[in-house]
Image (tube, rainbow, N blue to C red):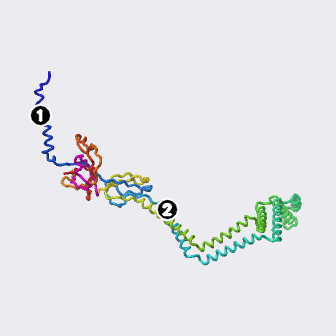
Amino acid sequence: MHPNPKRIIPIVLLIVIAVGGYYVYTNYFSPTANTNTASGFIEGEEINVAAEIGGRIEAITVDEGDTVKQGQEIVRLDRTMINAQIAQAQAALDTAKSQLAQIKNGPRASDVSAAKVAIDAAQQNYDKLRAGGTASDVAAAQAALDAATKNFAKVKAGLTADQLAQIKAQVDTTRAAVEQAQAAYDRAGGSSNPFIAQLPQSLALQQATNAYQAATAALNDALTHPTASELAAAQSQIDQAKAVLARLTPDAAQLAAAKSQVDQAQAALERLTPTTDSITVVENQVKQAEAALYILQVQAAKMTLKSPTNGIVSRRAAHVGEIAAPNAALLSVTNLDTVKLTIYVPENQVGLIKIGDTFPVQVDSFPDQKFAGKVIFIATQAEFTPRNVQTKSERVNTVLAVKLQIANPKADLKPGMPADATLK
Protein backbone atom coordinates (compact mmCIF):
# COMPACT_ATOMS: atom_id res chain seq x y z
CA MET A 1 0.00 0.00 0.00
CA HIS A 2 1.57 3.36 -1.08
CA PRO A 3 1.34 6.59 0.93
CA ASN A 4 -1.14 9.14 -0.21
CA PRO A 5 0.66 12.06 -1.92
CA LYS A 6 -2.08 14.45 -0.89
CA ARG A 7 -1.26 13.81 2.78
CA ILE A 8 2.54 14.22 2.37
CA ILE A 9 2.50 17.57 0.54
CA PRO A 10 0.92 19.54 3.41
CA ILE A 11 3.48 18.16 5.88
CA VAL A 12 6.39 19.20 3.64
CA LEU A 13 4.92 22.68 3.23
CA LEU A 14 4.65 23.09 6.98
CA ILE A 15 8.31 22.11 7.47
CA VAL A 16 9.46 24.57 4.77
CA ILE A 17 7.42 27.36 6.32
CA ALA A 18 8.82 26.64 9.80
CA VAL A 19 12.42 26.64 8.61
CA GLY A 20 11.92 29.81 6.61
CA GLY A 21 10.26 31.54 9.54
CA TYR A 22 13.13 30.62 11.85
CA TYR A 23 15.64 31.96 9.33
CA VAL A 24 13.79 35.25 8.93
CA TYR A 25 13.41 35.62 12.69
CA THR A 26 17.02 34.94 13.54
CA ASN A 27 18.37 37.17 10.80
CA TYR A 28 15.93 40.09 10.91
CA PHE A 29 13.81 40.07 14.07
CA SER A 30 16.07 38.42 16.67
CA PRO A 31 17.59 40.82 19.23
CA THR A 32 21.04 39.74 18.12
CA ALA A 33 20.30 39.85 14.42
CA ASN A 34 22.09 43.14 13.98
CA THR A 35 24.83 42.40 16.50
CA ASN A 36 28.08 40.71 15.42
CA THR A 37 29.49 38.89 18.44
CA ALA A 38 32.70 36.84 18.25
CA SER A 39 33.80 34.47 20.97
CA GLY A 40 37.11 33.14 22.21
CA PHE A 41 39.07 32.40 25.36
CA ILE A 42 41.17 34.70 27.52
CA GLU A 43 44.87 34.06 27.06
CA GLY A 44 47.73 35.07 29.33
CA GLU A 45 51.39 35.32 28.41
CA GLU A 46 53.11 32.38 30.13
CA ILE A 47 56.83 32.76 30.80
CA ASN A 48 58.96 29.79 31.82
CA VAL A 49 61.50 30.40 34.59
CA ALA A 50 64.68 28.36 34.06
CA ALA A 51 68.17 28.39 35.54
CA GLU A 52 71.03 29.32 33.23
CA ILE A 53 73.41 27.48 35.56
CA GLY A 54 72.62 24.07 37.00
CA GLY A 55 72.66 23.34 40.71
CA ARG A 56 70.83 21.90 43.68
CA ILE A 57 67.58 23.70 44.52
CA GLU A 58 67.90 25.19 48.00
CA ALA A 59 64.54 26.96 48.24
CA ILE A 60 61.32 27.57 46.29
CA THR A 61 59.41 30.46 47.81
CA VAL A 62 56.15 30.19 45.80
CA ASP A 63 53.62 27.57 44.75
CA GLU A 64 51.09 27.18 41.97
CA GLY A 65 48.42 29.87 42.11
CA ASP A 66 50.52 32.34 44.10
CA THR A 67 50.60 35.95 42.96
CA VAL A 68 54.10 37.27 42.33
CA LYS A 69 55.66 40.64 41.56
CA GLN A 70 58.30 41.32 38.95
CA GLY A 71 61.77 40.90 40.49
CA GLN A 72 60.50 38.81 43.41
CA GLU A 73 62.77 35.90 44.40
CA ILE A 74 61.04 32.62 43.60
CA VAL A 75 63.84 29.99 43.39
CA ARG A 76 67.27 29.89 45.03
CA LEU A 77 70.03 27.44 44.14
CA ASP A 78 72.78 26.28 46.50
CA ARG A 79 75.74 28.70 46.31
CA THR A 80 78.23 26.93 48.61
CA MET A 81 80.66 25.97 45.85
CA ILE A 82 80.51 29.23 43.93
CA ASN A 83 80.92 31.26 47.13
CA ALA A 84 84.19 29.39 47.76
CA GLN A 85 85.29 30.13 44.20
CA ILE A 86 84.44 33.81 44.65
CA ALA A 87 86.55 33.93 47.83
CA GLN A 88 89.45 32.33 45.96
CA ALA A 89 89.10 34.76 43.04
CA GLN A 90 88.94 37.71 45.44
CA ALA A 91 92.16 36.58 47.09
CA ALA A 92 93.85 36.29 43.68
CA LEU A 93 92.67 39.81 42.80
CA ASP A 94 93.97 41.21 46.09
CA THR A 95 97.36 39.59 45.47
CA ALA A 96 97.57 41.00 41.94
CA LYS A 97 96.67 44.49 43.15
CA SER A 98 99.27 44.26 45.90
CA GLN A 99 101.95 43.27 43.38
CA LEU A 100 100.96 46.14 41.10
CA ALA A 101 101.12 48.63 43.97
CA GLN A 102 104.50 47.29 45.04
CA ILE A 103 105.90 47.62 41.53
CA LYS A 104 104.57 51.15 41.04
CA ASN A 105 105.89 52.28 44.44
CA GLY A 106 109.37 51.03 43.60
CA PRO A 107 111.66 48.62 45.49
CA ARG A 108 112.87 49.02 49.04
CA ALA A 109 116.52 49.92 49.54
CA SER A 110 117.09 46.76 51.56
CA ASP A 111 115.70 44.60 48.73
CA VAL A 112 118.02 46.25 46.19
CA SER A 113 121.02 45.84 48.51
CA ALA A 114 120.24 42.15 49.08
CA ALA A 115 119.87 41.57 45.33
CA LYS A 116 123.27 43.16 44.64
CA VAL A 117 124.91 41.03 47.32
CA ALA A 118 123.42 37.92 45.71
CA ILE A 119 124.81 38.96 42.31
CA ASP A 120 128.30 39.52 43.75
CA ALA A 121 128.30 36.13 45.50
CA ALA A 122 127.13 34.31 42.37
CA GLN A 123 129.68 36.11 40.21
CA GLN A 124 132.55 35.32 42.59
CA ASN A 125 131.56 31.65 42.67
CA TYR A 126 131.42 31.56 38.88
CA ASP A 127 134.79 33.30 38.49
CA LYS A 128 136.43 30.99 41.02
CA LEU A 129 134.95 27.91 39.40
CA ARG A 130 136.01 29.00 35.93
CA ALA A 131 139.57 29.73 37.11
CA GLY A 132 139.92 26.30 38.72
CA GLY A 133 142.44 25.34 41.43
CA THR A 134 146.25 25.55 41.46
CA ALA A 135 148.35 22.49 40.66
CA SER A 136 149.18 22.01 44.33
CA ASP A 137 145.51 22.30 45.32
CA VAL A 138 144.52 19.70 42.73
CA ALA A 139 147.34 17.36 43.85
CA ALA A 140 146.34 17.70 47.50
CA ALA A 141 142.69 17.02 46.65
CA GLN A 142 143.67 13.94 44.61
CA ALA A 143 145.81 12.66 47.48
CA ALA A 144 142.92 13.13 49.90
CA LEU A 145 140.65 11.18 47.56
CA ASP A 146 143.19 8.35 47.26
CA ALA A 147 143.57 8.16 51.05
CA ALA A 148 139.82 8.10 51.57
CA THR A 149 139.50 5.34 48.96
CA LYS A 150 142.16 3.20 50.65
CA ASN A 151 140.59 3.73 54.06
CA PHE A 152 137.22 2.61 52.72
CA ALA A 153 138.80 -0.55 51.31
CA LYS A 154 140.51 -1.25 54.62
CA VAL A 155 137.32 -0.74 56.62
CA LYS A 156 135.36 -2.91 54.22
CA ALA A 157 137.94 -5.75 54.36
CA GLY A 158 138.03 -5.86 58.17
CA LEU A 159 140.81 -7.71 60.13
CA THR A 160 143.35 -9.92 58.36
CA ALA A 161 143.51 -13.65 59.04
CA ASP A 162 146.72 -13.20 61.10
CA GLN A 163 145.15 -10.49 63.24
CA LEU A 164 142.05 -12.62 63.81
CA ALA A 165 144.25 -15.63 64.73
CA GLN A 166 146.14 -13.54 67.29
CA ILE A 167 142.88 -12.46 68.92
CA LYS A 168 141.62 -16.04 69.04
CA ALA A 169 144.96 -17.19 70.58
CA GLN A 170 144.58 -14.52 73.25
CA VAL A 171 141.13 -15.92 74.06
CA ASP A 172 142.56 -19.43 74.41
CA THR A 173 145.44 -18.19 76.63
CA THR A 174 143.16 -16.27 78.98
CA ARG A 175 140.76 -19.22 79.17
CA ALA A 176 143.61 -21.50 80.31
CA ALA A 177 144.67 -18.94 82.91
CA VAL A 178 141.12 -18.87 84.28
CA GLU A 179 141.08 -22.66 84.54
CA GLN A 180 144.44 -22.68 86.47
CA ALA A 181 143.31 -19.89 88.80
CA GLN A 182 140.02 -21.71 89.42
CA ALA A 183 141.89 -24.91 90.39
CA ALA A 184 144.10 -23.02 92.89
CA TYR A 185 141.04 -21.27 94.23
CA ASP A 186 139.25 -24.61 94.76
CA ARG A 187 142.32 -26.14 96.55
CA ALA A 188 142.26 -23.24 99.00
CA GLY A 189 138.76 -24.22 100.02
CA GLY A 190 136.82 -22.20 97.52
CA SER A 191 133.68 -20.40 98.58
CA SER A 192 133.38 -22.68 101.65
CA ASN A 193 136.51 -21.07 103.11
CA PRO A 194 135.34 -18.02 105.11
CA PHE A 195 138.74 -16.37 104.56
CA ILE A 196 139.00 -17.13 100.81
CA ALA A 197 138.48 -13.47 99.79
CA GLN A 198 141.65 -12.53 101.69
CA LEU A 199 143.79 -15.17 99.97
CA PRO A 200 145.85 -14.47 96.80
CA GLN A 201 144.03 -17.34 94.98
CA SER A 202 140.77 -15.28 94.99
CA LEU A 203 142.45 -12.20 93.49
CA ALA A 204 144.23 -14.30 90.87
CA LEU A 205 140.92 -15.89 89.79
CA GLN A 206 139.26 -12.46 89.46
CA GLN A 207 142.13 -11.07 87.36
CA ALA A 208 142.16 -14.13 85.09
CA THR A 209 138.38 -13.93 84.59
CA ASN A 210 138.58 -10.20 83.66
CA ALA A 211 141.33 -10.89 81.13
CA TYR A 212 139.31 -13.70 79.55
CA GLN A 213 136.20 -11.54 79.26
CA ALA A 214 138.22 -8.74 77.60
CA ALA A 215 139.73 -11.17 75.08
CA THR A 216 136.28 -12.63 74.26
CA ALA A 217 134.83 -9.13 73.75
CA ALA A 218 137.69 -8.24 71.41
CA LEU A 219 137.03 -11.39 69.36
CA ASN A 220 133.28 -10.66 69.11
CA ASP A 221 133.99 -7.07 68.08
CA ALA A 222 136.38 -8.25 65.36
CA LEU A 223 133.81 -10.70 64.01
CA THR A 224 131.03 -8.00 63.76
CA HIS A 225 133.06 -5.39 61.85
CA PRO A 226 132.79 -3.48 59.59
CA THR A 227 129.36 -2.15 60.56
CA ALA A 228 127.02 -0.29 58.19
CA SER A 229 127.74 3.03 59.94
CA GLU A 230 131.52 2.50 59.58
CA LEU A 231 131.13 1.82 55.87
CA ALA A 232 128.86 4.87 55.47
CA ALA A 233 131.39 7.10 57.26
CA ALA A 234 134.22 5.86 55.05
CA GLN A 235 132.09 6.40 51.90
CA SER A 236 131.23 9.93 53.05
CA GLN A 237 134.96 10.75 53.22
CA ILE A 238 135.30 9.60 49.61
CA ASP A 239 132.32 11.74 48.49
CA GLN A 240 133.67 14.84 50.21
CA ALA A 241 137.09 14.35 48.64
CA LYS A 242 135.50 13.95 45.19
CA ALA A 243 133.46 17.15 45.68
CA VAL A 244 136.60 19.13 46.59
CA LEU A 245 138.43 17.76 43.54
CA ALA A 246 135.40 18.51 41.30
CA ARG A 247 135.34 22.14 42.42
CA LEU A 248 139.00 22.45 41.52
CA THR A 249 138.45 20.85 38.09
CA PRO A 250 134.97 22.03 36.90
CA ASP A 251 133.26 20.58 33.83
CA ALA A 252 130.93 22.35 31.36
CA ALA A 253 127.75 21.49 33.31
CA GLN A 254 129.13 22.99 36.53
CA LEU A 255 130.16 26.17 34.74
CA ALA A 256 126.70 26.46 33.11
CA ALA A 257 124.98 26.03 36.47
CA ALA A 258 127.17 28.71 38.08
CA LYS A 259 126.51 31.08 35.15
CA SER A 260 122.76 30.43 35.51
CA GLN A 261 122.93 31.49 39.16
CA VAL A 262 124.52 34.76 38.08
CA ASP A 263 121.80 35.36 35.47
CA GLN A 264 119.03 34.61 37.96
CA ALA A 265 120.46 37.02 40.50
CA GLN A 266 120.72 39.71 37.82
CA ALA A 267 117.11 39.11 36.74
CA ALA A 268 115.97 39.42 40.35
CA LEU A 269 117.60 42.84 40.57
CA GLU A 270 116.01 43.93 37.28
CA ARG A 271 112.57 42.93 38.57
CA LEU A 272 113.06 45.38 41.42
CA THR A 273 113.44 48.21 38.89
CA PRO A 274 110.30 47.68 36.75
CA THR A 275 109.93 48.78 33.16
CA THR A 276 106.80 49.99 31.41
CA ASP A 277 106.33 46.52 29.93
CA SER A 278 106.56 44.82 33.31
CA ILE A 279 104.00 47.22 34.79
CA THR A 280 101.68 46.52 31.85
CA VAL A 281 102.00 42.77 32.46
CA VAL A 282 100.98 43.10 36.10
CA GLU A 283 98.14 45.49 35.19
CA ASN A 284 96.83 42.88 32.77
CA GLN A 285 97.02 40.30 35.53
CA VAL A 286 94.86 42.57 37.69
CA LYS A 287 92.32 42.93 34.87
CA GLN A 288 92.21 39.18 34.35
CA ALA A 289 91.64 38.62 38.07
CA GLU A 290 88.87 41.24 38.07
CA ALA A 291 87.22 39.60 35.05
CA ALA A 292 87.41 36.14 36.67
CA LEU A 293 85.82 37.51 39.85
CA TYR A 294 83.10 39.32 37.89
CA ILE A 295 82.19 36.15 35.97
CA LEU A 296 81.76 34.24 39.24
CA GLN A 297 79.69 37.04 40.74
CA VAL A 298 77.41 37.05 37.69
CA GLN A 299 77.04 33.27 37.95
CA ALA A 300 76.23 33.60 41.66
CA ALA A 301 73.55 36.19 40.90
CA LYS A 302 72.00 33.86 38.32
CA MET A 303 71.57 31.21 41.01
CA THR A 304 68.80 33.36 42.49
CA LEU A 305 65.82 33.21 40.10
CA LYS A 306 63.35 36.08 40.15
CA SER A 307 59.90 36.49 38.63
CA PRO A 308 60.19 38.00 35.14
CA THR A 309 56.82 39.75 35.44
CA ASN A 310 53.79 40.46 37.61
CA GLY A 311 51.36 37.56 37.51
CA ILE A 312 50.53 34.20 38.99
CA VAL A 313 52.50 30.97 39.21
CA SER A 314 50.71 28.78 36.70
CA ARG A 315 52.94 25.71 36.92
CA ARG A 316 55.59 24.29 39.26
CA ALA A 317 57.78 21.47 37.96
CA ALA A 318 60.53 21.33 40.60
CA HIS A 319 61.03 20.62 44.30
CA VAL A 320 63.58 21.57 46.93
CA GLY A 321 66.60 19.27 46.92
CA GLU A 322 66.38 18.38 43.24
CA ILE A 323 69.13 19.22 40.78
CA ALA A 324 68.09 21.95 38.37
CA ALA A 325 69.47 21.33 34.89
CA PRO A 326 70.50 24.37 32.83
CA ASN A 327 67.62 25.82 30.77
CA ALA A 328 65.08 23.37 32.22
CA ALA A 329 61.81 25.11 33.19
CA LEU A 330 61.30 25.07 36.95
CA LEU A 331 58.26 27.36 37.21
CA SER A 332 55.89 29.14 34.82
CA VAL A 333 54.56 32.63 35.55
CA THR A 334 51.57 33.98 33.64
CA ASN A 335 51.43 37.75 33.13
CA LEU A 336 47.94 39.08 33.98
CA ASP A 337 48.62 42.82 33.66
CA THR A 338 47.57 42.51 30.03
CA VAL A 339 45.67 39.57 28.56
CA LYS A 340 44.67 38.68 25.03
CA LEU A 341 41.54 37.39 23.31
CA THR A 342 41.64 35.71 19.91
CA ILE A 343 38.38 35.89 17.95
CA TYR A 344 37.52 34.71 14.44
CA VAL A 345 35.86 37.13 12.02
CA PRO A 346 34.23 36.14 8.68
CA GLU A 347 36.11 37.21 5.59
CA ASN A 348 33.37 39.59 4.46
CA GLN A 349 33.61 41.55 7.74
CA VAL A 350 37.39 41.76 8.23
CA GLY A 351 37.57 44.84 6.04
CA LEU A 352 35.58 46.74 8.66
CA ILE A 353 38.26 46.10 11.32
CA LYS A 354 41.67 47.74 11.55
CA ILE A 355 44.62 47.72 13.92
CA GLY A 356 43.97 49.98 16.90
CA ASP A 357 40.15 49.58 16.93
CA THR A 358 38.61 49.00 20.34
CA PHE A 359 35.64 46.69 21.00
CA PRO A 360 33.78 45.86 24.22
CA VAL A 361 34.49 42.43 25.70
CA GLN A 362 32.38 40.58 28.24
CA VAL A 363 32.96 37.44 30.30
CA ASP A 364 30.45 35.27 32.14
CA SER A 365 32.11 35.91 35.50
CA PHE A 366 31.44 39.66 35.22
CA PRO A 367 28.23 39.96 33.16
CA ASP A 368 27.69 43.63 34.03
CA GLN A 369 31.23 44.73 33.26
CA LYS A 370 32.73 45.52 29.88
CA PHE A 371 36.45 45.41 29.14
CA ALA A 372 38.10 47.31 26.30
CA GLY A 373 39.73 45.05 23.74
CA LYS A 374 42.19 46.74 21.39
CA VAL A 375 42.94 45.12 18.02
CA ILE A 376 46.66 44.36 17.84
CA PHE A 377 46.74 41.67 15.15
CA ILE A 378 44.72 40.66 12.08
CA ALA A 379 45.64 37.44 10.31
CA THR A 380 46.55 37.62 6.65
CA GLN A 381 45.41 34.08 5.84
CA ALA A 382 41.88 32.70 6.16
CA GLU A 383 41.07 29.43 7.91
CA PHE A 384 38.04 27.40 8.92
CA THR A 385 36.40 28.34 12.17
CA PRO A 386 38.08 26.41 15.05
CA ARG A 387 35.96 23.56 16.42
CA ASN A 388 35.89 24.90 19.97
CA VAL A 389 34.65 28.40 19.06
CA GLN A 390 31.51 28.17 16.89
CA THR A 391 28.60 25.80 16.25
CA LYS A 392 28.98 22.76 14.04
CA SER A 393 27.19 24.40 11.15
CA GLU A 394 29.44 27.46 11.27
CA ARG A 395 32.72 25.55 11.38
CA VAL A 396 32.73 25.29 7.59
CA ASN A 397 32.89 29.10 7.28
CA THR A 398 36.25 30.67 6.46
CA VAL A 399 37.38 33.27 8.96
CA LEU A 400 40.45 35.31 9.89
CA ALA A 401 41.90 35.39 13.39
CA VAL A 402 41.85 38.75 15.12
CA LYS A 403 43.72 39.26 18.37
CA LEU A 404 42.56 41.77 20.99
CA GLN A 405 44.65 43.10 23.85
CA ILE A 406 42.83 43.83 27.12
CA ALA A 407 44.16 45.79 30.06
CA ASN A 408 43.71 43.76 33.25
CA PRO A 409 45.03 45.87 36.16
CA LYS A 410 42.95 44.08 38.80
CA ALA A 411 43.70 40.62 37.38
CA ASP A 412 39.96 39.92 37.07
CA LEU A 413 40.41 38.12 33.76
CA LYS A 414 42.04 34.69 34.03
CA PRO A 415 43.43 32.47 31.26
CA GLY A 416 40.83 30.05 29.92
CA MET A 417 37.77 32.23 30.61
CA PRO A 418 35.33 32.25 27.67
CA ALA A 419 34.76 35.80 26.42
CA ASP A 420 32.60 37.57 23.81
CA ALA A 421 33.64 40.63 21.80
CA THR A 422 30.94 42.82 20.24
CA LEU A 423 32.20 44.06 16.90
CA LYS A 424 29.22 46.36 16.05
Residue depicted at 42% across the width and 59% down the height: 302
Q: Please identify the quarter of the rendering in which residue 211 is found.
A: bottom right
- Give coordinates of residue 72: x percent, y percent: 35, 61
Taking 198 as reference, is 101 left or right?
Answer: left
Pick the residue in front: 403 or 62: 403
Q: Which residue is mark 2?
A: 85
Q: Residues within 10 Å of mark 1 (few under 14, many from 20)?
A: few
Location of residue 414 with respect to 278 vertically, above or below: above
> Is residue 113 visible in this depiction of the protein?
yes
Which amino acid type corresponds to the residue marked 2 in the rendered image? Gln
For mark 2, give the secondary structure.
helix
Magenta range is 337-361
How far separated are the C-alphas under marks 1 and 2? 89 Å
Q: Secondary structure at mark 1?
A: helix
Observer-nearest residue: 27 or 228?
A: 27
Farthest residue in the bottom direction?
Answer: 109
- In the rendered image, is residue 183 in sight? no
In this picture, residue 107 sits left or right of residue 256: left
**Where in the figure is residue 131, as x and y percent of width and height?**
77, 71
* Earlier sequence position, callout 1 versus callout 2: 1
Of the 4 image quadrants, the one containing the N terminus is top left
Q: Nearer the viewer, residue 358 or 279?
A: 358
Queried whether the magenta region covers residue 115, the answer comes back as: no
Residue 14: give its label.
1
Residue 124: which quarter of the image?
bottom right
